[in-house]
Amino acid sequence: MKKHQMLIGGKWVDPASGDWFETLNPFTAKPWALVPRGSKPDVDRAVEAADCAYRGEWRKLTATARGALLRKLGDLIASEAQRLSEIESTDNGKLIAEMRGQLNYIPQWFYYFGGLADKIEGRVIPIDKPGVFNFTREEPLGVVAAITAWNSPLLLATWKLAPALAAGNTVVWKPSEYSSISAFAFGELFEKAGFPPGVVNIVTGFGPEVGEPLTTHPKVAKIAFTGGDKTGEHIYQMAAKGIKPVTLELGGKSANIVFDDAELDDAVKGVVSGIFAATGQTCIAGSRALIHRPIYAEFVERLLALAKTARMGDPLDPGTQVGPVTTQPQYNKILDYIRIAKEEGAVCRMGGGPAKRPECGAGWFVEPTIFTDVKPEMRIANEEVFGPVLSIIPFDDEEEALRIANNTVYGLAAGVWTKSIRRALLMSERLEAGTVWVNTYRAVSYMSPFGGYKRSGIGRESGLDAIREYLQTKSVWIDIAGNAPNPFVMR
Ligand code: TXE
């Protein structure tokens, strides 16, 4: 098994602990590589390296040169897309078909934010005081801690690294302990693109051993995190102690709402893609399908018919449609929720347990599962399962759909299926979610802001909004009158 090293200050290094841990392939449930077990001394070294780069070589580069490096990186990722997607599929079990698409798209973030790097401009303020010139500068924050989850390792990191670097910050990145391997391959590309040493550092390991010292390090200026809401809440508390800004992306319980005037075939596909794509392990999973009562029975039948055709198996096989769950704890958590839903009285119409199909081998597979007769107050309708488990809830009218959809602590995304423009506009205005899709689902772009309302998070990733998350504004005052005013009053 390959024993990997961490990237600190431009060098590939062993962990201070001298320990490595195994990372497992979710399809075989067997170890396939060794990940350095980072700890506080590694974090300290990485933050020092990032701080040194921030104050040194990186700061001296022009914004145009920074942008050129990001675009070069984008080219390198495009040329390595196949290799990177194979690593991702092997390490986290996501379908090769989806990972190829993701890796071919990831360069766009580096092109877009590379292009933005030299368009970050301040303003001249037409100040109300005579004899004074006042302008603003948009400046980087310093060292950014990027902490990412296992479900889309490189995409989630890209959403943080591209705007953070474009804005002139340096980064210490801690990937998830369950899916670190692609980070090492990614790190090599930063080196190859010519980023100065220390601009991007990678420290691997566990939350308490690496994430905690990273978020609490006094020289870390900002934390950008994707993960569960409990961990997000904890990180937010740590950040508060250091008065550090955060970007938090914390998952959800998104509603996919189908009205009786919808194009039903499209809506069925949209609901299936919302919950079974990526084995339901996406923050934007449409885990609640809200179905208009006049079409409820027909919709459920059509949905079952399509969902039953899903091919499970090896994620590296391009024909596979539903892969394994990425981690064993997640597998157990999904099965627990299935049991809870049954105990609460939801009716299991499909799946409802581990997948024992021969094509699933020894992997952590859960049968795509559909529950009907789900009541909005059940746990299965309120808590994030993060797996291929759909709750179907009927509704009578727009007001009831909105009440059910918004009655959650989360607010990441929502889907609306209707042919009525009035309904589409009404719902998109009143749904409490950072993203609303109408007659589509699971669309993201480097250009469009992404983030959550309520407990789904703080801040936005992608688009123009994202770069502001990594900047701070300085106001500069210059006296041009030359006569010192009365020192005892405010000017
Ligand atoms: O996430 P964690 P886990 C949800 C999903 C899942 C649950 C738990 O419901 O079942 O979260 O998943 C690092 N200080 N989502 O346990 O713990 C950790 O090492 C600093 C939704 O994998 O949130 C990893 O790098 N860092 C989500 C990262 O935080 C800490 C995607 C995320 O891990 C830390 C994934 C600490 N004290 C899971 N503790 C989404 N938004 O889509 C852990 N970490």
Image (cartoon, helix red, strand yellow):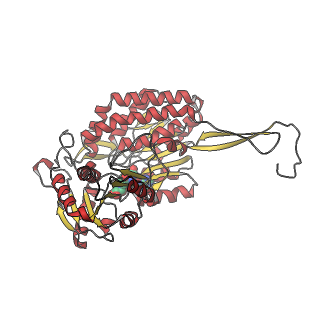
Residue 206 showing in the rendered view: no
Which picture quadrant has residue 121? top right
Which quarter is ligand 1 in?
bottom left
85 sits left or right of 412 in the view: left
Dividing the picture into quadrants, the one containing residue 379 is bottom left
Percent position (x, y) of residue 487? Answer: 87, 49
164 vs 254, left or right, is: right
Image quadrant where one finds the N terminus: top left
Task: Give percent across and percent down for residue 251.
Answer: 38, 55
Image position of 134 with respect to 296: above or below = above
176 or 218: nearer the viewer: 176
Residue at 89%, 39% (x, y): give it.
483
The answer to whether 56 appears left or right of 17 in the picture is right
- Numbered-mark total: 0
The residue under the point 53% across, 46% down is 469
Across and down, in percent, residue 255 comes to: 34, 59
